[in-house]
Image: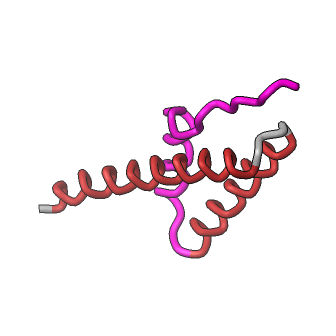
Amino acid sequence: MSTIVPFPLAKSDGAVKEVVAALARLQGAAAEAYWRRLIKAKRLGMSAQGVSQADTDEILLAFGQEVFLSLARQYLSNEGDAA
């Protein structure tokens, strides 16, 4: 039996940047709905590929942390421009 080793999404600069850009354009309920759809789709995709639920949870948590850290960095760097 072979083991599926998925690529860690958090290490994919393209995936992180794409989601950060989308979330930066959206606000409130629209941003939350986008995030929920994205994570659900990624979870379903990994499940279909045979990735365990525990591995999927770990991958998505790391991805979410990277996305939100990138968003925080973006907003912090933009705060200095207002002064």
Residue shown at 62% from the left, 60% from the top: 35
Of 52 and 44, nearer the camera is 52
* Residue 80 on image: x %, y %: 16, 56
State whether residue 52 is above or below residue 33: above
Residue shown at 78% from the left, 28% from the top: 3
Task: Please provide the residue range marked out in magenta.
Answer: 1-28
* Residue 34 on image: x %, y %: 65, 61
User: In the rendered view, does 76 fall on the left or right side of 55?
Assistant: left
User: In the rendered view, does 53 fall on the left or right side of 24?
Assistant: right
Residue shown at 55% from the left, 42% from the top: 18
Image quadrant in which you'd find residue 79: bottom left
Q: Quadrant of the C terminus?
A: bottom left
Q: In which quarter of the image is the N terminus?
A: top right
* Residue 55 on image: x %, y %: 67, 45
Residue shown at 65% from the left, 53% from the top: 57
* Residue lying at the far left of the rendered structure: 83
Dominant secondary structure of the magenta stretch?
Answer: helix
